[in-house]
Image (tube, grey):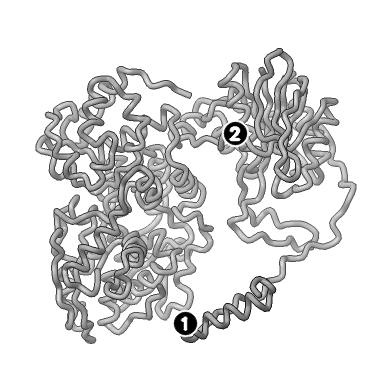
Amino acid sequence: MTTVESHDGKRLLEQLGASDYGKPPLGCMQCGLCAATCPLGPAMELPPRKLILYAAAGNLEPVLSSPALWMCVACYACSKRCPRGIELTEGLWPALRDAAMQAGIQPPAELQETFQNVLKYGNVLGKSPRQRLDWTKGLDVRVLDLSREPRPVDVLWLVGCYPSYYPRNQVVARAFARILTELGVSWGILGARERSPGECDRMFGEEGLFETLVEQNRELFDKQDFGKLVVLDPHAFRALQSFYPRFGAWYPVQHYTMFLAEHLEQLRPLIVRPVEAVVTYHDNCCVGRRCGCYDPPRELLQLIPGVKLVEMARNRDDSLCCGGGGGGMWLDAHIVAHGGQRLSDERVRQAAASGADTLAVSCPYELSRFEDAAKVTGLEERLKVRDIIELLAESMELGERSVS
Amino acid sequence: MNIAVVVRQVPDLIEPLEIAPCGTAIDLDAASFILNESDDHALEQALLLKEAGGGTVTVVALDSGDVDNTLYTAAAKGADALIKISQQDHAPRSPRTAAARYAEAVKPLGADLVLVGVQAHDELDGALPPFLAAAMGLPYVGVIRGVRAATETGAVIVCKEFPGAVMAQVRVKLPAILGILGADQPPRYVPVSRIRAAMKSAQLSECEAAAPQREPLVSVVRLVPPAPAARAEMLSGSEAEVAARIADILSAKGLVK
C-alpha cells in the first residue's frame, strides 16, 4: 500500500487551487462557516475547516484516515456559504477521498459494493442490465428504445437507476413516460444500454470510475440524434451539466422540472383533476442550492388545482439535504455509527411542521429516503411523499396507484 | 516468499443461467463472467503475505470470460506478474484438464506457495486444487481461513476450518498448495484509476495450453432448471384476523404450542 507523505497535503490543496473548481483552498481564512453550516459538521471529528487546516499544514494522514472523510453528503451548504468562494463540495471532498483511496485507505464497504455495481453493471443497484426495461412492463404508451431503433428525437430521456429498477420509483418512470407522450414530444430511451452517468462516483472521489462512465456514455450518446437529454435525477443533471464538459463531452441537458416548466402552457389544458393536498416542496441540493433553480418545481405544483403550496421554514438555498448525495445514499450506517443523524428524518419533521400533508420531491433518492424517514419518525399517517411527476400525472388522469 | 495465485472466471449469477440446447450444459455464450469469490480471497491472502514479508505475487488465469480485466485489477492491487493461458480448444471440460493447464504455467515459476480458491460456484466439489496439487506433485491443504509465515523459513502456519467452525492451526512445509476459503481480511477495493493505469502499464504474458482435453470421469446426463417454489401466501383482513392466521400457521408447523 502507498504511504501518505506529509508534504502531499499542501500539494493537494495547491493542485486543487490551480484547477477551476472554485477559489484556491489555501485562501481559507479558517472562519469556520463551513463547519457550522454543515448539517453533519457537529458529528465530524474533522469538519471541513479542519480538513483544510490539517492538509495545509502538511498533516494529511489524520485527514485521510478520519471517518469524517466519508460523511459529506454533497449538500453544497459549505460551498454556498464560504466567504472565500472555495468549492469544498465538488473540489475539496472528492480530491481528499481520491487521495485516501490512492493511499490504500478503504472506503466503507457499502460504497465499495456500489462502485463495483456501477463498474460491472452500469447501475448502482447491482441489477442485470437486461432488466433495465422492466419498468415498462404493462405500460400503456409506446417506449422507443433508441439503442435498438435509432431515430431522431427531441428528447433522449435518461431514465436513471432507481426509476428503472426500484419498484417505488418505477411508478414515477411510468408516469413520466405518459406525460411525455401526452405532451406530444418525440422521445426515446437507451434501454438496456443505458448506464449511470456517475455523479455520485465522482463526488465520492472515484474519479477513474467516473472517467470510465463518461467514455461509455459518450459513445452511447454520440450514436444518437437528439435535441436534449432530460433526466429525473438531479445528480445526473449536475454531472452532465458540469462534469462531463470537463472531458469535452457537452450535451444540452435538463432536469425534468426545468423541461416540464418550459411546457407549462401545453400542460395547463391537460391538468384537469383537482388534487386536494397541502403540499410542501423539498428543494434538492443539485438543482436547488447548486444551480439556483427554485421556481420551476413550484410553478409545476401551482399548476395543479386543489394544491395548496406551503413552505418549510428551511427552503430554497437554506433547504436541508435528504442526506443521500455524494454517496450518502449508501452510508446511513456509517454516518450514524460516527455520531451523525439521518438528515431525512429531520427533514420529514420539518415538512410535517409546515402543516403540509404531502411532501413533494423531484429526486429519485428522496422518495425512499423520506418514506422510510416518515415511518421511522411516526409521521407515516400524516405525511405522504410524492414526486412532482406523480402529482402532475394524477391531475392529468395518467397516474396509477403508488406502491409503497 | 514467491507466491502464485490461480484465479478462475465463473458465470455471474446476476443473469439467470440458461441451459444450452444440448441439455447437458449451461449456455455460457449467454452468460457474463466474474472472478470466482474464493479466488479473490486467495489473491488478497497472497498480497497480505507479500506486504508482511516481501516476495512476489504472480497471478495465473485461463483465458475465458472477462479475464484481462481480472488480471489488470490484480496488478492494480499489487500483483507483480500476470500470466494468461490461451486455449485453442476453448475452456476445459473437466477440472483435471484445467489443473493440467494451470500446472504447466505454474510449475516453471518455482513458487514457494500456490494459492487458489477452495471451490468455485460452478465447481462446488472443489476438485481443481487437489488435481493441481497432484499434477505438480505438491502437498495440498484446503478450507483455509488465513495464512501467516512461520518463524522458521520454508513453512507457513495456516488456519484450517473443520465442520462446526472448529479451527486448527496447521504448519505446512513449503512448497505447497493451499485452497483458500477466506483471506485474513476482505478483498481490498482498488480505485478504478489504478486499474486503468495498470491496463496501460502492466505486462500480461501469454502462454499456450499444451495439455489436451481430458474427458470428465463423470458425465452429465441432463440439466434441469430449478422448479419455481410455491408462491408466498399473502395474508389479508383485519389485524386480529391476520394475527390469528399467523398463530394458526405457527402452531400447524409446530413452532408454538
Q: Which residue is mark 1?
A: B239
Q: At x 61% / y 46%, what residue is drawn? A: B34
- Measuring from the top left, give residue B208's x and y in whole percent: 74, 31
- Measuring from the top left, give residue A68's x and y in whole percent: 32, 38
The dot on residue B64 is none
> How far apart are the alpha carbons under marks 2 and 1?
56 Å
Would residue A164 be found to the left or right of residue B147 on screen? left
The answer to which of marks 2 and 1 sits earlier in the sequence is 2
Q: Residue furthest left?
A: A83
Q: At x 31% / y 59%, what residue is drawn? A: A233
Task: Using the image as rendered, state which of residue A254 and residue B184 is in the foreground.
Answer: B184
Numbered circles on residues, count: 2
- A263 in relation to A238, above or below: below
Would residue B186 be found to the left or right of residue A263 on screen? right
Task: Using the image as rendered, state which of residue A123 and residue A329 is in the foreground.
Answer: A329
Asked if marks 2 and 1 touch (Cβ < 8 Å), the reply is no
Q: Is residue A258 visible?
A: no
Residue type, mark 1 in image: Glu
Give the mark toward the camera: 2 or 1.
1
Task: Using the image as rendered, state which of residue A89 and residue B83 is in the foreground.
Answer: A89
Would residue B69 be found to the left or right of residue A266 on screen? right
- Measuring from the top left, give residue B162's x and y in whole percent: 75, 40
- Measuring from the top left, give residue B134's x and y in whole percent: 85, 31
Residue type, mark 2 in image: Leu
Question: What is the chain identity of the residue bearing mark 2?
Answer: B
Q: At x 30% / y 74%, what residue is drawn? A: A390
- B23 in relation to A38, above or below: below
Q: Residue furthest right?
A: B217
Q: At x 84% / y 41%, what residue is drawn? A: B213
The dot on residue B71 is 2
Q: Residues within 10 Å of mark 2 (few under 14, many from 20)?
A: many
